[in-house]
Image: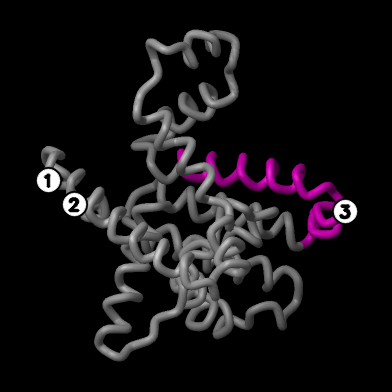
Amino acid sequence: YYDFSGYSDMAIGLGEMFGFHFLENFNYPYISKSITDFWRRWHISLSSWFRDYIYIPLGGNRVKKLRHIFNIFVVWALTGLWHGAAWNFIIWGLYFGIILIIEKFLLGKLLNKLPKLVQWIYAIIFIVIGWVIFRANNLTEIGYIVKKLFDFSSTDFIALLSINNFSLSLIYMVIGIILMFPIYPKIKEKLGDKTWYQWLEVFFCIGLLLLCILFLVSSSYNPFIYFRF
């Protein structure tokens, strides 16, 4: 998420330098309360493109129910195939297509009545399983990882959180979880017009840039993960 969202923000910034205005591509997707909400927040440019050039020309939702379901299936099969000619991508696309159909025709009203925390837990579970399907190399690996995700019988949480296992990775994970929520926009909304805050924001961004450069310089081979697409 941070990698993808980060380079999307870089593209937006570079575009502004040349006089182009690109829309936001991510809108805090991990605060979603349903899979429908997630796909309004994640990779907005992709979902908008498929909506405008595939879904709507097929008839969108202005058709009979069976045709509507068919349209959603086609769009999500193509969304999966767009990522690569591999079965896991197609399964990933159809997986989200099926969930979206279920939400639209069966669970929509029920989900809206549930507490917001329950809605969020529901969404985050299906999102994480979706990433397992996306990343795994075969069906066996998908089954193995999903099983491990929900098998807590052999997990020693005390040992996991002990000082011996404490590392920078844990710090990064905690920071990552905090920043996936819209805390920064809310702070900026309240303090953005204060001069001291504006200077603090500038120095923070400069410090963050220098830290990123240090990490890049000190790291070893760092392949571009999107070459597989």
| Amino acid found under the numbered disc labelled 2 | Ile
When the figure is inspected, residue 112 is found, relative to residue 156, above or below; the finding is below
Crowd band around label 1 with a 10 angstrom C-alpha radius: few (<14), some (14–19), many (20+): few
Looking at the rendered structure, the kind of residue marked 3 is Lys
Q: At 62% from the left edge and 40% from the top edge, which residue is drawn?
A: 125
Taking the spot 39% from the left edge, 47% from the top edge, the residue there is 87
The residue wearing badge 2 is 213
Q: Secondary structure at mark 2?
A: helix
Whole-number angstrom distance, CA of label 3 to CA of label 1: 50 Å
Distance in Å between CA atoms under marks 2 and 3: 47 Å
Residues at marks 1 and 2, CA–CA distance in whole angstroms? 6 Å
Query: Seen from this angle, which residue lies furthest bottom?
Result: 19
110 is within the stretch colored magenta: yes
Contact, CB < 8 Å: mark 1 with mark 2?
yes
Residue picked out by circle 1: 217
Decide whether the magenta segment is chiefly helix, strand or loop: helix
Asked whether residue 96 appears in the rendered view, the answer is no
Query: Regarding mark 1 in the picture, which secondary structure is present there?
Result: helix
Number of marks in the rendered image: 3
**Residue ID for mark 3:** 113
Kind of residue indicated by mark 1: Val
Q: In the rendered structure, which segment of residues is drawn in magenta?
A: 105-132
Q: Is residue 157 left or right of residue 19?
A: right
The mark lying in front, picked from 2 and 3, is 2
